[in-house]
Structures are given as structure tokens and as C-alpha cells.
Amino acid sequence: MNSTSSNKIAAGGIDEAIDALHQATAYYTAEPIVDELLAELGWPAFDKRLVDPSCGDGAFLARAVDALLQAAPAVDDVKLTQLVHGWEIHAEAADAARTRLTEVLRAAGRSDRAAAATGRMMVTTGDFLTDAPLTPTWSICAGNPPFLRYAHLHPLLQQRYLAALPDYSRADMLHGFLDRCAKVLLPGGAIGIVASDRWLFNSNAARLREVLGETLGIAGLRRIDGASAFYRAKTRRAGTLPRVHPVALVLRARELCPQPLQALGRAPLYPGASSCAGTGRTLEDVATVRLAPWLGSKGVFVVDQATAATLPAEHLVPALDTDDILHAQDGTRYVREPTRRAIRTFRAVEPTGAVLDHLKANLHRMAKRGHRAAKFWVPPETFERFDLDVPHLLIPRIARDLQSARVPAGILPVNHNISIVSINGEAGLDEIEERLRDPRSVQWVRERAPALENGYFSVTTTLLRQLPLF
């Protein structure tokens, strides 16, 4: 293959990668949200330079230019290009932004030719994360940067950002934009963006929060309605809105941030959450909180009754999953008689007989992430040290409340449900159940747990451990 062909393939590959990114993230911000955020940033201002690092179809740019023209209709076009600029990685979206700016300028009295020329100059087609300046350049960074996990990026973009971005800013596209905006900010400047709330509390953003918090603080933070805050790009294929819970966020120099919003560091932040001290103790102080083990794909280490009947009973443990947790008429949860069995093996002892035959015959069913190169007889997450001699409380990870289900001794919860094991026996479980039912506990979790659809939220192990006891 000659070099020309290789270049064409490489170019085609990156174009496909950028288009995939556009399809995943091209949700633009409605004008009322844009106007509110620009006002919070003190815009319009004729002594500041504004950049939108991922301008999409130009929503922020158009409103920023319109605000300048409303404040000073006679401002010349050269000055406008100095004050407002946008970057956009997707060529079609960048063209849409130029067209939108042209329309704003034409409506303000510019000729078609002058409006088009100025609109072209105000938008750069390029990747802000890799091509924009690394030195302080702008007074205001405003926009709606993409939020997409690094693992969901096209491999070509993964390679690009692996080489260009610090490790603490690569978990999500949003992290990279926040870090880069902080680097290009002039002294006294501000960042104002619409963002997913997850970077404020996810552990993979802790180092990013810490780095940003060395110079910046939170000057403004409020939740916005995801159903009305966004609209789809015309060049994006139809589909449902992403499951995000957006916030409008303003970051400024720490010394300029009002109390009590200024703190930004490794500790998670929960927008709108009230402070609840409780008794001073947490659930972790009185119970062991852990994920139930994931034993891999069905039919290998977790088997149905028919398969269990062919295996020695001494190697089997009754196992239950989320579908075994039922609701009683009074709203409480209970578990039904388990129909599954988990095969119990030990690292130090290779099984024999029917158990060994079963595992060898069914290991091909195992998901790739569950394969073990050595000691194939051990599940992806072993439970040989799991205490089956005491009862447990089980809380589904996706729930609308903190109602727990009592799991008798001798039964193993599987597949990353949350097990809460009392260290004080049955009486301890009674106390924990009462604490979990407390409305203040439910409120505390609702204010901090990642929200899902239809009133559900994600109850993580980490959050449960931090739950105050009321």
C-alpha cells in the first residue's frame, strides 16, 4: 500500500471517529439556559475574550454576539472576532455555527458578504483538546462540552487523547474540557458550562477536582431540567436523549467564589444536597457493606436446578439475584426460595469429578472479562471467604428507596447486589433495617445517588458506607 492510500485510510478513519463522537454527544443548549449562563459570567463585556471550546451549531456564540450587538450596535467586525471565538471538531457542525453567526450579523445590519466573512473567522474547525493554545488566552470559557466516557470513544480518539491529555482528565470527555479550559483561562477569568453532574461526585474525577480546586472554586451551581435544556443537532441521527442530569456550573478564581460554594477538591460534591450529620456514625461503622460477588456468565458457576441435580450437593450453595427480591403488599421487600445454585470452589484445590467436568464443558460460556488464564475453576470473584453463617440484608443497586430484603444464613447474593452484613447478629440487622427506613436516610441517598429514569437511583456501595445513622 502506498503512502497516499494510507493517508486516505487514516483520514477516513478519523472522520468516522469524529462523526461517531458527534452522534453520541450532539445535544445543544436551549437559548434560555445559554442566556442565563452568559449573564452569570458578566457577559456582554468589551474587555474580555470569550471562547466556546465545543461550539456545536453556535448556540453560545450566537447569543454572545447578539448580546454584544445589543449593548453596542456600532461595534466593528474586527472587534467582534477578537472578543468571541468557537472551536468545533465536527466539520458540519462548525459550518452550522458559521451560518448561525452569519444570520445574527446580517440581522444586525451587516451585508451578506461581511456577515459571512466575519462568521467564518469566528469559528475554528479543530479539536480544542489537542489543537487549542495551552497558555492563558481567554477571559471566559462558555459552552456545553461533550460528556462521554473515554471507554465509549472511537479507538482513534482514544489514542489521540491518551497521548495528549493528563491521566486525571481522560476518564470522560468532559474532564478533558474542564482541564483544558482551566489552562487557557486568563487571570480573573471564569468558566461557565452546562455539564453532567457526575464529575462532581464520581471517584474517577477526584484528582481532576483536586487539580482544578488548586486555583478555581465554584461560584455558581444549579441543576437544570435535562428534558428542556437540550435540543438535537440537525446532523445527528434520531434517538433518545442521553441519561444525564445536567447542571449549570460557573468556576472562578478561588478568592472570588462566595461561601459556601468555593470548595472544590477530591471530596465528592452533591448539587442541592442538604447537610445531614446524624449521630456522627455511618453505616460502615456498624456493618460490613460490600458488593455481592459476580460469578460470571450464567451456566458456569451459577446453575439452574436441573444442572444442580447433576452435581454433588456439598459443592453447591443456594444463590439469589435481583429477580428473587419481591415486594410485599405493605411495601417491604422479601426474597423467595432460591432456584439457583452457586458452585463453591477454592483457589488452592482443583475440583474433581462432576464439578470439574461441568466447568470444563461450560467455560466457553464465560464472558471475556470473567476468564482466568490460570485456576480456571475459580470464578471471576471468589466467595470462598464470604460468611454464609450469618443472615444479610440485601439492597438492589437500582432502587426507589432503601427498603432491604432479609437474606437467611446459607444463601449467597450474586451479581453485584449490595449485601449489608451486621457485625452484631440478628439484633444488629433489625437496627440497620430501621435506620434504612428512616425518611432522612432515604432523603440523604436521593440527594447524593446518581439519578436514573422514573424515580430510580443508583445505590452504590461507597455511598451506602457513608450513609449517616439517624
Image (cartoon, rainbow, N blue to C red):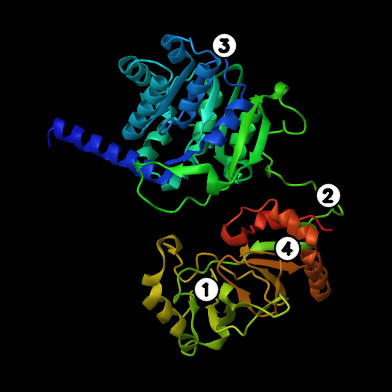
**Vertical arrangement, residue 328 with respect to residue 287, above or below:** below
Question: Tag 4's secondary structure?
Answer: strand
Residue identified by numbered label 3: 47
- Classify residue 452 by image quadrant: bottom right
Badge 3 local density, few (<14 within 10 Å), some, or many (20+)?
A: few
Residue identified by numbered label 2: 277
Badge 1 local density, few (<14 within 10 Å), some, or many (20+)?
A: few
Question: Tag 3's secondary structure?
Answer: loop
Residue sitting nearer the eye, 258 or 316: 258
For the residues labelled 2 and 1, the Cα–Cα distance comes to 48 Å
Residue identified by numbered label 1: 349
Q: Position of residue 14 (x, y in %)?
A: 29, 37
Residue drawn at point x = 71 percent, y = 69 percent: 403
Residue at the far left: name it. 2
Q: In the shown orientation, is residue 461 left or right of residue 246?
A: right
Question: Tag 2's secondary structure?
Answer: loop
Looking at the image, tell me whether mark 1 or mark 4 is earlier in sequence order.
Answer: 4
Residue identified by numbered label 4: 288
- Confirm whether residue 433 shows in the render: yes
Looking at the image, tell me whether mark 2 or mark 1 is earlier in sequence order.
Answer: 2
Looking at the image, tell me whether mark 2 or mark 3 is earlier in sequence order.
Answer: 3
Question: Tag 1's secondary structure?
Answer: loop
Q: Position of residue 430 (x, y in %)?
A: 81, 73
Q: Amino acid at mark 1?
A: Val
- Classify residue 256 by image quadrant: top right
Residue sitting nearer the eye, 41 or 112: 112
Q: In the shown orientation, is residue 347 left or right of residue 372?
A: right
Badge 2 local density, few (<14 within 10 Å), some, or many (20+)?
A: few
Q: Position of residue 263 (x, y in %)?
A: 72, 33
**Vertical arrangement, residue 402 with respect to residue 390, above or below:** above
